């Protein structure tokens, strides 16, 4: 039986009286195209934070490729192949686009701690970073500081950094959030062209995007999994409609 | 052995407790404003001691040169410090709230330097002597022991102010607003609290208290031009140990530091303040956010 | 095909440009040329010059902590003073060999940096700032009270510094002192420059730009901050030893808040996080201090305070920042 790319069992998180995650059993297959949806405040980003280790779980376990990572720090989980993007761009703003990706690749390659060799000597890393930018179509602005780019392109840099880590599991937190509708098409096509062996979990509000990209959908409501299934099943499910539209679906 | 040394030990303990308590009161009154400023506005105001110094100078000047009675002079000290803080906050400080620490550090250090120069220029380089008023000089006889009247007054006054402060924090709307804003600024703004005005008033209140503490404590923390630099560490330690943004925390920290410092200096004078600093480091090692701070 | 070749040329150009950023720039020889020229051109000022050179090393180490690691510290003098006292105590108690004294000072200061960093670098922001002050004040008080070793309030007396390599005695014109400080500064600069332009240095800058992102790419941020803090402490200790050995005196001010504060001031004048801020800010500040503070200390403090406020409000990048803005 092949190990799941990512799995949580009974994952819980509370801040005092506030519960953001309650007994979440979640399975992400290898090569998955999985979406996590739910109304605002459902706990989707908290879930990502718990999985990546930005938040410490109150209970339950997390498994990456079969191994228990519940007690590992964020950085250690990244080293094992877990990468994420942030809902609001978290970039090295004053550094150039190319360097943003170079930093990630350098970490992956384990050379980022090197004190002796000048940074410019690691040519292979720079070339790989450039190649990544080319794939995402932003290589023409490689040497510009990131904060000078259009927001949609910054979103692509965000993805490029995560890809630079050569992850096995990639968590995209609302990749198209804040992007003008004219530019979101590029992001969607980038996600579509991601390597098939990466297990992808996308948090999104945009239903068109979700139905276009996902093969499996999990619906999260108030920190609990409501239902999980194929896009067609989810679209037809009256409980989902009720949660989003607040009305009983007509029989 | 026997009764004599036991009497000596209890005498020492009472003495340390008494003087330490007085010291703690002064430290708290001065430092509480700093704690709230750092926790509420995210602004490290190293120049906070300048307001305490200002209060001390105002009070002493009014008493010595103009013959103003003690209590009105003290009130004037507090008011002067509070008023002086307002233009400073409006014109300079608020541009750096939540901003880079380095900016705040350099800005407030610059203010300290200017205050040192200003105080030397206006009042000369010497320490100002404070004469307690006649009705507070001498000793108070409590039966088993005599206590210095002024320090006793300081403790009582301090206790009264602390009680008033804490009651005000719990019972008044203003206090509730402060607590809300320290807890979650954005939430406070979204429920309609005018945080800009809140900052200004809180800063003025904290500075006024500092001025009061500086005046009251002028015989404990001597008023001189380098006041703000000299005692900066004490204020910082009280806030760090108490916990940023906390109002009760610095009180217990001040008790610890005040009594501890007095005790250590009395029992082991060759080590001076070293133990207090070592104690602080140990405390911060155990609880980096301070006793009452948020992790 | 032609498009492919052109495309490849663009690619190589970009990668070359990026890789070349870390190469030595001819302008970087300037400070050293000036320093060597000053040796010959200003023979009457070599003692002050030696002080300036040693202080540049100190402020350079502060820049590593402040400008590159983003750790705001009010206690960097703790390491300076540690190094000064180590070198001083050695020289006052029979071992006046300067180079070994310098190395001992750097190592012990680095150790102090490592240990204090372990304790305090777990926090950030205002709490960390306060703790740096507490560490420095603790050491100050320790030195104050350990009068038998440190001379306490009066300072360490009776230092006997031997000639370097047995040949170069510290003369009263400051010639040997100047050359000594210049060489040590050069070595320290080599270390700092290497670090800043290494992947480690770039990762530090990344952590300063966006710590959350750094964690999210698997970087051991805390460990790296500790490493740079320790190295900077060692360099600061070396600079303290230089001052001690060239003036044959160590006072409590070497551990003082004022010393830490002055480092920040000199750094902001020159420009933080630009490697050469120290080289500009230190001479400007120290020459001004040498000329003006003795005339009227009150005025000096006043205008210095005003300058600091003005720099923070108007010219945050310091002199180097202004120069950057002038270039196209």
Image: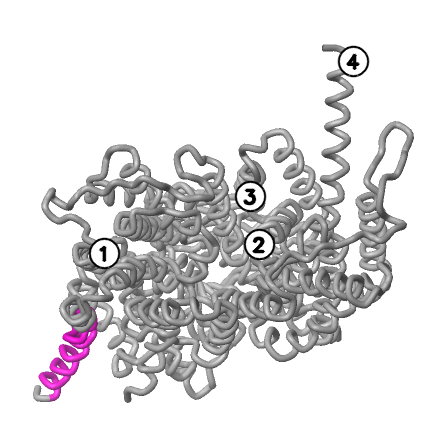
Question: Residue C218 placed where, x, y %?
Answer: 36, 55
- Pinpoint residue B171: horizontal percent, then vertical percent: 86, 59
The residue at which mark 2 appears reads as B230
Q: Residue at the location (84% across, 51% down)?
A: B157
Q: Are marks 3 and 4 in contact (CB under 8 Å)?
A: no
Where does label 1 land, which residue?
C188
Disc 1 sits on a residue from what chain? C
**Range covered by the magenta-colored residues:** C3-27
The answer to whether marks 1 and 2 mark residues whose Cβ atoms lie closer than 8 Å is: no
Q: Position of residue B282 (x, y in %)?
A: 54, 38
Residue, disc 3: B284
Dot 4 and dot 1 within a common chain: no
Q: Nearer the viewer, residue C155 or A115?
A: C155
Q: Using the numbered discs, state the Cα–Cα distance from disc 1 to disc 2 in whole angstroms.
A: 33 Å
Q: Residue at x 39, y 77 (%)?
A: A154
Q: How is the image coloured?
A: one colour
Dot 3: element: helix
Single out the mark in the foreground, 3 or 4.
4
């Amino acid at each position: 039986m092949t190990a799941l790319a990512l799995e949580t069992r009974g994952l819980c998180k509370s801040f005092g009286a506030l519960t953001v995650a309650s007994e979440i059993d979640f399975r992400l297959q290898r090569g998955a195209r999985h979406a996590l949806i739910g109304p605002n405040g459902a706990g989707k980003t908290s879930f990502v934070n718990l999985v990546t280790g930005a938040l410490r779980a109150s209970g339950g376990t997390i498994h990456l490729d079969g191994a228990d990572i519940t007690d590992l720090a964020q950085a250690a989980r990244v080293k094992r192949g877990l990468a994420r993007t942030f809902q609001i761009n978290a970039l090295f703003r004053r550094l150039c686009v190319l360097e943003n990706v170079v930093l990630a690749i350098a970490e992956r390659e384990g050379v980022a701690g090197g004190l002796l060799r000048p940074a410019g000597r690691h040519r292979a890393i720079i070339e790989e970073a450039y190649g990544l930018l080319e794939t995402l179509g932003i290589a023409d602005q490689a040497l510009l500081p990131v904060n000078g780019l259009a927001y949609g392109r910054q979103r692509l840099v965000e993805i490029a950094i995560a890809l630079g880590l050569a992850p096995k599991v990639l968590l995209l937190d609302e990749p198209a959030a804040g992007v003008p509708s004219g530019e979101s098409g590029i992001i969607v096509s980038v996600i579509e062209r991601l390597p098939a062996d990466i297990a992808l979990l996308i948090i999104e509000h945009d239903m068109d995007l979700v139905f276009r990209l996902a093969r499996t959908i999990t619906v999260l409501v108030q920190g609990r999994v409501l239902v999980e299934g194929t896009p067609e099943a989810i679209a037809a499910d009256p409980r989902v409609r009720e949660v989003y539209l607040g009305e009983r679906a007509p029989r | 052995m026997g009764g004599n040394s036991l009497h000596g030990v209890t005498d020492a303990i009472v003495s340390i407790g008494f003087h330490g308590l007085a010291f703690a009161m002064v430290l708290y009154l001065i430092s509480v404003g700093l704690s709230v400023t750092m926790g509420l506005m995210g602004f490290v105001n190293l120049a906070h001691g300048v307001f305490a110094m200002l209060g001390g100078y105002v009070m002493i000047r009014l008493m010595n040169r103009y013959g103003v009675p003690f209590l009105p002079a003290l009130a004037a000290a507090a008011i002067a410090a509070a008023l002086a803080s307002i233009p400073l906050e409006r014109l300079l400080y608020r541009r750096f709230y939540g901003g880079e620490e380095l900016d705040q550090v350099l800005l407030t250090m610059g203010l300290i330097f200017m205050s040192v120069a200003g105080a030397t220029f206006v009042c000369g380089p010497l320490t100002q002597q404070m004469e307690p008023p006649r009705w507070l000089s001498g000793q108070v006889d409590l039966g088993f022991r005599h206590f210095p009247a002024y320090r006793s007054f300081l403790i009582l006054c301090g206790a009264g102010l602390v009680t008033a402060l804490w009651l005000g924090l719990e019972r008044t709307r203003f206090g509730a607003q402060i607590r809300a804003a320290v807890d979650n600024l954005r939430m406070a703004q979204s429920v309609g609290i005018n945080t800009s005005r809140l900052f200004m008033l809180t800063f003025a209140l904290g500075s006024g208290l500092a001025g009061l503490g500086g005046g009251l404590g002028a015989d404990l923390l001597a008023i001189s031009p380098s006041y703000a630099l000299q005692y900066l560490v004490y204020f910082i330690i009280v806030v760090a140990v108490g916990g940023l943004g906390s109002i009760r925390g610095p009180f217990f920290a001040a008790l610890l530091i005040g009594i501890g410092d007095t005790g250590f200096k009395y029992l082991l004078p060759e080590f001076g303040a070293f133990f207090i600093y070592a104690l602080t480091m140990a405390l911060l090692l155990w609880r980096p956010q301070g006793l009452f701070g948020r992790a | 095909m032609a498009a492919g070749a052109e495309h490849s040329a663009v690619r190589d150009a970009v990668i070359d440009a990026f890789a070349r950023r870390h190469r030595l720039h001819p302008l970087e020889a300037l400070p050293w040329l000036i320093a060597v020229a000053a040796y010959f051109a200003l023979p009457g000022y070599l003692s002050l010059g030696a002080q300036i050179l040693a202080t540049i090393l100190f402020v350079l180490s502060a820049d590593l902590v402040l400008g590159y690691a983003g750790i705001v510290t009010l206690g960097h003098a703790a390491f300076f003073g540690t190094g000064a006292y180590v070198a001083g105590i050695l020289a006052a108690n029979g071992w006046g060999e300067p180079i070994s004294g310098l190395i001992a000072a750097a190592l012990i200061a680095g150790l102090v940096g490592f240990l204090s960093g372990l304790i305090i670098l777990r926090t950030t922001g205002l709490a960390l700032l306060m703790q740096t002050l507490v560490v420095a004040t603790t050491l100050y008080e320790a030195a104050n009270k350990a009068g038998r070793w440190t001379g306490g309030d009066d300072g360490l007396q009776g230092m006997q510094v031997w000639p370097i390599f047995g040949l170069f005695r510290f003369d009263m014109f400051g010639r040997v002192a100047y050359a000594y400080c210049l060489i040590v500064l050069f070595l320290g600069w080599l270390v700092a420059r290497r670090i800043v332009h290494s992947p480690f240095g770039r990762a530090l800058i990344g952590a300063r730009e966006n710590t959350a992102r750094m964690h999210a790419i698997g970087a051991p941020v805390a460990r790296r901050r500790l490493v740079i803090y320790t190295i900077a402490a060692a360099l600061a200790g070396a600079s303290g030893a230089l001052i001690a050995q060239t003036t044959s005196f160590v006072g409590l001010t070497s551990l003082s808040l004022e010393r830490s504060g002055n480092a920040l001031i000199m750094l902001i004048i020159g420009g933080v996080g630009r490697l050469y801020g120290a080289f500009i800010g230190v001479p400007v500040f120290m020459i001004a201090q040498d000329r003006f503070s003795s005339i009227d200390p009150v005025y000096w403090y006043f205008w210095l305070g005003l300058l600091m406020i003005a720099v923070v409000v108007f010219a945050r990048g310091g002199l180097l920042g202004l120069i950057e803005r002038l270039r196209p």
